[in-house]
Amino acid sequence: MRLLSLIFFTSLRQAFRRKFLATLILACFLVLLLSLALAQLSLDDKGRITVDFGVASIQLLLVGLAVFFGSNFISMDLTQKNLWMILTKPVRPSLFFLGRYLSLAFLLVLATIAMSFLLVSFFIFLDIPIQRILFYTLFGFLLESWLILAFVVFFSSYVSSYLVVFYCLSLFFISHFVDSLYFFLKENSGFFSLVFQKVFYLIPNLESVNWKTQLINQDSLAFMDFITSSLYIFVWIGFVLSGGLILMEKREF
């Protein structure tokens, strides 16, 4: 535990020392402000469009942070000498990358809080009602980014950083269409249809924590649905991250 906490805080210090992190966070704020400003140009139902633009921007920005910053951070560990120097000490690769993951996940929490504060401030300024479902939705986006970050660790164990970005972004978009694809295949019979129906069980369903539609339509969300969907994503995070750490352990450095 002491080694893990040391890796965690060291990773945070390294992240804050890198200038591109501050630049990336600033870019996130600018994109969020721009999207909210563009929503105000609409003539119809500005409130709903502002909510839609605002939460969609946070969702995409969190995924972008998880994919691009995560892959860049881990790929530098794999290509530079600092990882080799650390591994000469009694630190296992799995423990090192677990500390990296936890530090990056914490940075995503900070980014979520910062962008949520900006979004809520904008809503207050525009007299848009703030409901509990908004915070459920933002937490769902955070869970989504944590899972994508776990896949970054998993894919980084055996492919280059460029392929990690491609795989994770592809997985993100596919995971949001799993329900639709499964419904389409279920309506068709045949060998390949049955095979692909089984394959879709191996893909996480990110729509389970995407409550943006309920937020825009001002629908309520049952607390038990929130808990079960969150646990579903946590199970996926544990499964994917464990697989990635095992692969990191077997990799030769």
Image (cartoon, grey):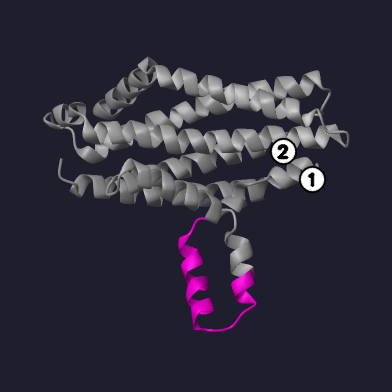
Label 2 secondary element:
helix
Asked if 24 appears above or below 70 in the picture, the reply is above
Using the image, tell me which numbered label, if any, was put on residue 6: none
| Label 1 packing within 10 angstroms: few (<14), some (14-19), many (20+) | few
Q: Is residue 205 visible to us here? A: no
Q: Is residue 188 magenta?
A: yes
Q: Residue at x 46, y 26 (%)?
A: 107
Q: Residue at x 37, y 37 (%)?
A: 71
Q: Amino acid at mark 2?
A: Ile
Q: Earlier in the sequence, mark 1 or mark 2?
A: 2
Front residue (pair 109, 170): 170
- Secondary element under disc 1, as helix, strand or loop, is loop
Residue 56 on image: x %, y %: 65, 38
- Label 1 sits on what residue type? Asp
Numbered badge on residue 219: 1
71 in the magenta segment: no
- Residue positioned most to the bottom: 190
| CB within 8 Å, label 1 to label 2 | yes
In the rendered view, tell whether residue 58 sits above or below residue 144: above
User: Which region is colored magenta?
Assistant: 184-204
Q: CA distance from mark 1 to mark 2?
A: 8 Å
Q: Which residue is mark 2?
A: 133
Is residue 253 in view from this perspective? yes
Corner quadrant of residue 10: top left
Q: Position of residue 96 (x, y in %)?
A: 26, 34
Using a 10 Å C-alpha cutoff, classify the residue at mark 2 as few (fewer than 14 neighbours), some (14 to 19) or many (20 or more): many
Which residue in the rendered view is the most extreme toward the right? 44
Return the x and y of residue 73 as percentages of the image width and height. 34, 31
Residue 246 location, x and y as percent? Answer: 26, 49
